[in-house]
Amino acid sequence: MPVRDERRAESPGELVLTVLACGSAVVVFAVFAWIVGDIVRHGASEISWSFLVDPPSRAGRAGGISSVIVSTLEILLVCLGVAVPIGVGAALFLAEVARGGRFAGRLVRAGLDVLAGVPSIVSGLFGNAFFCVTLGLGFSILSGGLTLACMVLPLLTRSLELGLRSVPDDYRMAAAALDLSSTRFFAQILLPAAAPGLAAGLLLGIGRAMAETAALILTSGSVDRMPGSLLDSGRALSVHVYELAMNVPGGEARAYATALVLVLLLVAINLLSNTMVHRLVSPRVSA
């Protein structure tokens, strides 16, 4: 007896949507490949070991970017060191405490959504007025990192909240049946289960923080020497690219090379985050 093919033929509307979706994916990948290819074509010839370990000289036209890399990593560490604990706490509040649509939860979500839409130049002006002037931190790595933390916090919190909300309620009922404390439930069950959401929020936050320019010019400054402490001014990679491309004659090739280092650094952080998430999720899946 012949087997009947029960696969349903796609309607013309579904076929159009499929073609549009595939076409959009191809366009996105093509734009990404074009941008990366252009950066590699113009900047790869400038990349060398000395470019990575030597300090800048002649306004960046010579030397390397060692002090710029160190400043960028220090700004990023300050940003994540402040944003991650606050973001995790706020996400736990929104996903667990205020999950029933309480007024406090709606108010916090509205505030986060508004904060996420604030232009970076406005965040930079706030950071300059509050951290640099009011708190007396001046143009420093600490001011830049704290300003970026304010900008990253909405993305991190909302992404982690979605990750926490995606955890099945069976986990919560099982924890209640076993009489687990809230601390053990959050640390041992809920956060590992929401690790993909945390990783997504971290990557979005890191991407925005490392690509930010205007806010850092107004808070961390653009001094290209090696920082001695968090209270010293420091130039981030994105600011270095801007300075070389716009304010330094003959610095275009070095700007492309710095942009290439920035892209490679983002890729490395992406791979590291995915590896950490895989190690967090694998034991839970195997169990």
Image (tube, rainbow, N blue to C red):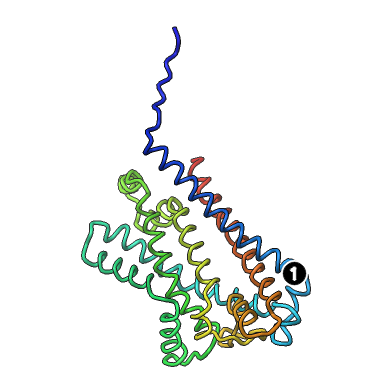
Q: Amino acid at mark 1?
A: Ile
In the image, is 272 to the left or to the right of 184? right
Task: State the image coordinates of residue 151 (x, y, percent, origin top left).
Answer: 43, 73
> Pointer 1: what residue?
47
Left/right placement of residue 22 relative to residue 162 reads right
Residue under the image location 56 percent in, 58 percent down: 31
Residue at 46% x, 53% y is 192
* Residue situated in front as seen by the camera: 120 or 172: 120
Q: Residues within 10 Å of mark 1 (few under 14, many from 20)?
A: some
The image position of residue 81, as x and y in percent, is 50, 72
From the viewer's side, name the closer residue of 180 and 92.
92
Mark 1, secondary structure of its residue: loop
Whether residue 239 sits left or right of residue 99 in the image: it is: right
Among all residues in the image, which is located at the extreme top? Answer: 1
Where 139 falls versus 94 (above or below)? below
Q: From what the image shows, is residue 19 above or below residue 139?
A: above
Q: How many marks?
A: 1
Question: Residue drawn at (73%, 73%), measured in percent from left and top?
Answer: 52
- Res. 153 image quadrant: bottom left
The one of 116 and 227 positioned closer to us in this rendering: 116
Q: Which residue is painted at 32% across and 58% down in the image?
A: 95
